[in-house]
Amino acid sequence: MSAPIPREIPDLPAVPASPVLLPSPVPATAVVAPAHRPRTAVLRLLIALTAAAGVALEALLSTPAHALSYFSVQANALLAMTMLLSASRAWRARLPLPSSVTGATLLYVLVSALAYHLLLGHSTPPFSMTAAAAAPPRWHAQWAALQLLHTVVPAAALLDWLCLTPAARLHLRQAAGWLLYPLAYLAFFLTRPILLPPSRPSRYLYPFLDVAVHGYRSTLANALLLGLAIYALAVLLVVMDHLRPSPTRRRF
């Protein structure tokens, strides 16, 4: 048999006036509406125009097909498009681009800058994107293109990331995905000489990946070392992103 239903319901305890709220796992910055940041938009537009100018200058000095075969030119073209979209979103108070996109383009221009200054800038014969036999003198158009692509634009992109981009947006799981583009470029780099006549100079654009000089075994070993270095740099960017202070939240 079921228990009888009581005729009167006992009084329930009163709800406290200020209930204790549990801490939310979502940070408050995730729900703050994006702000109109005209100065940030202008600075990123300038970075995009500088990167585009370096790409266009290199294409004029050689040919568009030859210039766009270089990793650094492709990286600067990707950065120009990313910065242009970021500038548009900052101006119109829209959500920023995904960190996977901005982190990847930053990584690629930093890789091109480090490769140039550590491996190519003082090589013999001198490195040139126009297959010149001599190093371009200072303030020459080719020298200016090299500096724009490998020094000015990477430094500006790094400063934008440090000073204008909120911290702790990058994640370690993104680092492996960022290697897909360098792997695709390596496949393009090794396939390109097959489609060119053997007598054509500069079939291999980078001396440390020259199959004609080093052979496939040494070239693939160098490529593996470069891939490990790129992954280490990607991990370093993620660690720095979580250790660096977040820029002051101003409408900059």
Image (spheres, rainbow, N blue to C red):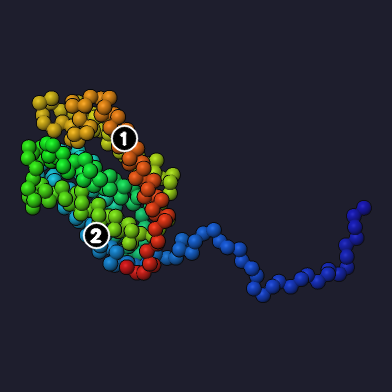
| Position in image of residue 220 (x %, y %) | 29, 29
Location of the C terminus (image quadrant): bottom left
Q: Residue 225 carries which label?
A: 1
SS label for mark 1: helix
Residue at 39%, 54% (x, y): give it: 241
Return the residue nearer the eye: 100 or 88. 100
Query: Above or below — where is 215 with respect to 150?
Result: above
Residue at 49%, 61% (x, y): give it: 27
Type of amino acid under label 2: Leu
Which quarter of the figure has residue 226?
A: top left
Query: Above or below — where is 24 with respect to 146?
Result: below
| Position in image of residue 41 (x %, y %) | 28, 63
Q: Can residue 78 be seen in this view?
A: no
In the rendered view, does 123 fall on the left or right side of 104?
left
| Dot 1 crowding, Cα within 10 Å, few <14, some 14–19, many 20+ | few
Residue corresponding to mark 2 = 45
The answer for how far apart the CA atoms under marks 2 and 1 are is 35 Å
